[in-house]
Image (cartoon, rainbow, N blue to C red):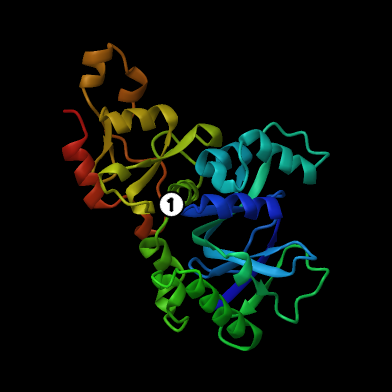
Amino acid sequence: MKIWVGVTDDDWFALLSQLRPDEVNFWQPGGSRTFRALQPGELFLFKLHSPKNFIVGGGHFVSYSALPASLAWDAFGEKNGVASFDELRARIRRYRRKDDAIDPVIGCNVLAEPFFLERRDWIPVPQSWASNIVQGKTYDAQSGEGRALWESVQLAVAAHGRVEEPSLVEDFSDENRFGAEYLTRGRLGQGAFRVLVTDAYERRCAVTGEKTLPVLEAAHIKPYALNGPHRVSNGILLRSDLHKLFDLGYLTVTLDLRVQVSQRLKAEWHNGREYYAHHGEPLRFHPADPARLPSPEFLKWHNESRFQT
C-alpha cells in the first residue's frame, strides 16, 4: 500500500485544524494533471512548506476530480481550507495570474476522516525528502521509510487521543479495505458524495443528458437526514430543477431505471409539459459500474415513501 505526502500552505492547515471537519478538499490550483498516486482509502498526509519540514496531519484518499471552483465551494465550503468563495478564487489567481476564467477549474483531492496533529506531535519528513519537491512524494507503507512513516503516524494519532479510529490503527495488511471497497464502507462526507456521483454519471444529467456542470446536482435517493448514506448507489445526478422535483416527490426513478412523473405536478401547478415528455423513458445516463447504479433498496424507498401518486 502507498502513502502520499503532499505539500500544503500553512493557512490551509491552520483553518482546517481549527474546524476539524469530517472531510477536506486538498486542492491544486491547476486542474490539468490527474492525481494517480493512491487508491481510495490509502493515506494522504499533509506537509507544510519548507522550512517547516514536518508532516502535520492527513486523511484517507477518496477521489480526484477536476472541478470548477464554484462546484468545489458548493461541495466543500470551508473544508477547502478557505473562509469564503472569494478567498478561494483569490488563492487560485495567486498561482494562476494570467488565467481570467470566470470559474477556473482546479484539481480536487477529496479526503475523508482527516486528522490534524498538535505541534508537539508533528512528524519530521523522511530523510530522503528533497528540498526541491513542490507537490509531494509517494512512499511504500510496507517497507523502509514508508513503513517507519506509517508507524510514526499511528503513534502520533494515538498520542492525539484518536486511537478509537479503526482506519488509522489497523494494519495495512488488510488489502480489502482499499480501492472500490473503501468507497462503499468508508465514512464519506457530503462533499465526497457529490464528487463521486458527479463523476460516476460522467457529468451528465441522468434524465436529460444535460452536461452544463454548474446546473447539475447530486441528489440523494434516500435523504441523508433519514439515514440515507453518502454512497454513489444512493445518488443520482440531476439537473437542478429535476433535483427539486425529485426531492419533493413529483418525479421518481423506477426499479428498472425508468423516469416516472406524478400526475400531481399538472394538477397542482397546471403545467409540466417538459417533464411529462420524460415519463416512461429509461435513464439517458447511469454509471457503467453495476456497483454504482442506483440501489433497488433506495429506489424502492423513494417510490413508496416520497413519490406522490
Quarter-wise, where is residue 306 in the image? top left
Secondary structure at numbered mark 1: loop
Amino acid carrying mark 1 in the image: Gly
- At a point 54% along the width and 70% down the height, the residue shown is 43
* Vertical arrangement, residue 240 with respect to residue 137, above or below: above
State which quadrant residue 262 falls in: top left
Q: Is residue 36 visible?
A: no
Q: Is residue 259 left or right of residue 190?
A: left
Residue at x-position 66% and y-position 40%: 88
**72 left or right, relative to 29:** left
> Residue 40: x and y, percent?
49, 66
Q: Is residue 239 visible?
A: yes
- Indicate the position of residue 139 as horizontal and vertical percent values: 64, 78
- Tell me where residue 98 appears, x and y as whole percent: 83, 39
Above/below status of 49 relative to 11: below
Q: Looking at the figure, which quarter contains the N terminus?
A: bottom right
Name the residue nearer the viewer: 230 or 130: 130
Extreme residue toward the front, this view: 120
Q: Residues within 10 Å of mark 1 (few under 14, many from 20)?
A: many
Looking at the rendering, in which quadrant would you find the C terminus? Answer: top left
Provide the residue designation for mark 1: 189
| Nearer to me, 161 or 65 | 161
Q: Choose between 81 and 122: the one closer to the eye.
A: 122
Tell how many labels: 1
Does 253 sit above or below residue 46?
above
Please, which residue is most extreme toward the bottom here? 144
* Residue in view at x 45 percent, y 37 percent: 217
Tell me: 175 left or right of 108. left
